[in-house]
Amino acid sequence: MELHTDKKFSIKSLIEVVFMKNQIFLSIIIDTFRLLILVGLSSHTTLSAQDSDNKAFKFIISPYIQDVTDSTFTILWETSTPFEGAIYLAKAEYTVLKPAMKMVAAEPGPVRFHKLVIGGLEPDELYYYQVINRNNLGDTLKGPITSFTIPNYDQAAISFTVVGDTQGNPAVWERIAELMFRESPQFVIHCGDLVQYGPNKDDWVDEFFKPANHLLRHIPLYPAIGNHEMNDQQFYQYFDLPGNDAFYSVKKGALMVIFVDTNKDILPGSQQYRKLERLLARSDERWKIVVHHHPVFTSDKSSYRSSMMAKPIKGDPNTLHLKDLYETYGVDFSLSGHIHGYERSWPVRKNHIDEDHGVVHIVAAGGGGRMRDASAYKNWFSVETKKMHHFLNLRIWRDRLRAEAIDTAGRVFDTWEKEKYPGRTNLKPPLVETPRRYFIDNTRIAVKNTNGTGAIHYRQNNGQYRSILSKEASLVVDRTTTVSAFVSNDQNDDSRSVVKTVIKIPLMKSQKSAVRAISADYYEGYFTLLPDFGQLKPTRTFSPDSLSLQDITPRAKDHFAVRFKGSFHIPDTDVYRFLLESFDGSMLLIDGKVIIDNDGVHYEIFREGYAALEQGAHFFEVRYFDFERRETLNLKIGKQDGAMVDFNRYIAGKAKK
């Protein structure tokens, strides 16, 4: 724009005039000029997710979708500095070319880790969301505008993909995420080992979230926790799990998916096992899947066997017992990882192939982890095994399921189908519960019919069946008893049977002259089983403060054994549960009686045992040996339906009522 001559103005002419009249004003004018320049440079900045990488404030993890319900979804993200985040939403309309984005949720204050829930949404509608962050300086950080639809499971098939063990290989994970997005899944299941080292933030940011950014901002991912996550807080921070617990369940139409933490106690006496049993018994969903990191069945030649005897076990010793629970309550298939590669079993029931009533077990650990050599031997339960990176693509429509295993080239290398027959009974087996599976005097057993109709049929030991039409049968027993039960309806359909045994155990009297100090005899030798310590001379003897291998120093790197002895104090007369974990072999004795035998060369294996203990002092002995690799020895104690705590709290009267 041109200015009239008589209105031209320059800073230079102004300075010259002022200088001629009064030099005092010169410094004022210069300072004012500088201030104007600074104000112009510091005007408010707006950054998008794409141009923020070189700025002081940026997305550490770009916005991504978490839990999705019939009317809500959750968005999480992380920023480099505290921002107040907000979500803007628009609903697509046929008559509107570009719908207006409106703020629907906002945070009350600035944070680095962000979580907002959007509600009031309708299934099968197309929405667009955008995350916008603002700080107290007025700077704005925007995420991309992203489309999203809540599935309508009344009309649409259930569609999802599965991956596991993406740890330490972002290139493969990025490729798989790209291929999964092409399949348009409604959600993604991850079987654990998302990262190589859970406490390392870079593993999460650079190796998990960044390679899958495009997938995760459109589609929710539900993870099982693996051993490589190391139960680190970042796993719980980055995934919005119910109750902040790695044991949880989600429902998608006619499908229930249960996620189990097999890094923790999942033995039949554990709280986690009882929660799983109740969920399965009460589930009305037509399809049931259980997801956990460690497999029930595997043919891998290098896993779950003694390195000396080369005796393979058919699955993880800490989860193998779960197959009985899955078979009882009609789980369709289990999903797991850990053993890198792919394996699909035949439908298995009672350790035989049963195509009508069996459970399929799938190892889907092909997300990026290093592969071992394939085995030439195929176990009886295995249909297909492959040592390759891959993911699964599954569709469920009413009574039919179809699954594909797809490699990183996009090729389908395995397919399978399952069909449920509408005329076949869908009666749920009864739930058999007892407050005390091990008891001193007596215990109560409740047999519950969780169906809306039908009669309960039950028997004790090998006696005659009794039938009742009520919702629950209750009985009190004072001896070891096995209860068998099933449910039937008016059409003469029967459910599967449930079998549960309660065990009476003798009370172990307290010891009058218990030794309060702990001693630990240390031995060196080439042990593959626990030795007869009475025939050996200790290399040295320690007086540790606790039952811990950390107190046994100095010691050899491998090939040693330790025998701990001491006493502990029981605050109440009751039945106590003991949980012994070791790598390699171990054994627990109470007052000279073997309670747990966890012998042999093996990796970390949990074993449980029970003892009825009188209030007062009792002797303990823990035997342990290490063959090679890492050394693990942990012992926990608790009342059989209570929380388990470190056994050291009970040593020398440390436990309190």
Image: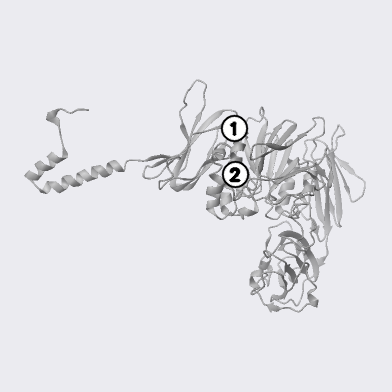
- Quarter the N terminus occupies: top left
578 on left or right of 132:
right
The residue type indicated by label 2 comes to Trp
Q: Residue furthest top?
A: 95
What number is the disc on residue 150? 1
**Quick one: 339 or 425, which is closer to the camera?**
339
The residue type indicated by label 1 comes to Ile
Residue 326 picture quarter: top right
Image coords of residue 31 (percent x, y): 20, 47
Question: Dot 2 lies on which element?
Answer: helix
643 on left or right of 171:
right
Question: How crowded is the residue under tag 1: few (<14 C-alpha within 10 Å), some, or many (20+)?
Answer: some
- In the displayed structure, 181 sits above or below 324; it is above
Residue denoted by label 2:
173
Mark nearer the N terminus (1 vs 2): 1
Marks 1/2 in contact by CB < 8 Å: the verdict is no
What number is the disc on residue 541? none
Image coords of residue 283 (percent x, y): 73, 40
Residue under the image location 69 percent in, 78 percent down: 541
Image coords of residue 75 (percent x, y): 53, 40
**Quick one: 244 or 62, which is closer to the camera?**
62
Residue 220 seen in render: no
